[in-house]
Image (cartoon, rainbow, N blue to C red):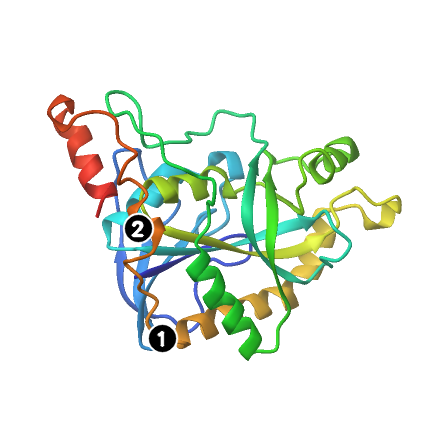
Amino acid sequence: MLAIIGGTGIYQLDGLEVIEEHQIETPYGAPSAPVIRGKLAGQSICFLARHGQGHQLLPSEVNYRANIWALKSVGVTRILAVSAVGSLREEIAPGQLTVPSQYFDFVKGNRERSFFGEGLAAHVSTAEPTCGDLTARLSQAAESLDQQLHTGKTYGCVDGPRLGTRAESHFLRGAAGCDLVGMTNVPEVFLAREAQLCYCTLCIATDYDCWLDDPAQHVSVEQVISRYGASLERAKALVHQLIAQGDLSNEDCGCRHSLDCAVLTPEEHLSNNKRELLELLKR
């Protein structure tokens, strides 16, 4: 089952026939919002508002572990996240859509980054952190809508909530080789891999961050919001087209087997709680 994680501006999924609203308590506390399960274009879909149903949560306040655990617990196997980003490349113009393939962790705050630890040792590979199959399906959906969709790009994740300095912007696009900058996809993408979930982000470029010389092009909240509406509609149309293409399941995908050789702690040394967690992650 596919889940949509809605970022800025997406607090519900248009056209979703709601079947059930799950109020889930997880071992890590409450998720950002209830998990909504329903039908869209004949497909079973879940939806979760990353920042809360009224956008109450800063990026650093999102309970990423609870969000991923909650989605996994209701049978989700694939996640498409939708996020607003700044563009670090002139060819990715504000308003355009991108599905990154790589992530650069520039988060310095204390976000909980892993399900593992405290008696359960594991190390998953994140060399290729996103799902190639889901990316290909998104590209197919974009082509059918005659939409431009950038792929093969790198997303640099920062703490926020402040908008970055020019020095940081130039570092990310230069030394770090990033094409996009955002505040929310780390550790979300890596937790999804630990949970053996296929994961991709549909990024909406709202601005050029602040690396351009022209101060009028430097990112501001006013600029982000004013440019976001039309782009958001294109992103929603792409999500609907992806779902309308049919069955999104792919149990043979490598993302669904990321724990096969990753766990180091023998089962007999696991506590009951850690054994239950591992059973959930391996589903």
Determine whether the residue tagged by mark 1 lies in a helix, strand or loop. loop
Residue type indicated by callout 2? Arg
Q: Which residue is mark 2?
A: 256
Residue, far front: 261
Percent position (x, y) of residue 198?
A: 38, 53
Residue 125 at least partly seen: yes
- Position of 273 relative to 59 (above/below): above
| 34 relative position to 239: left or right | left
Percent position (x, y) of residue 199?
A: 42, 52
Would you call the spot at circle 1 few (<14 residues within 10 Å), some (14-19), or many (20 or more)?
few
Residue at the spot 42% in from the left edge and 39% down from the top edge: 190
Residue 31 at least partly seen: no
Give the mark, 2 or 1, whose residue is nearer the N terminus: 1
Question: Residue 280 appears in which quarter of the rendering?
Answer: top left
Determine whether the residue tagged by mark 2 lies in a helix, strand or loop. helix
Q: Which residue is mark 1?
A: 246
Report the number of discs.
2
Q: Quadrant of the N terminus?
A: bottom left
Question: Residue 65 appears in which quarter of the rendering?
Answer: top left
- Position of 141 relative to 84 (above/below): below
| 9 relative position to 253: left or right | right
Residue type indicated by callout 1? Gly
- Position of 125 relative to 202 (above/below): above
Percent position (x, y) of residue 71?
A: 31, 50
Percent position (x, y) of residue 88?
A: 72, 47
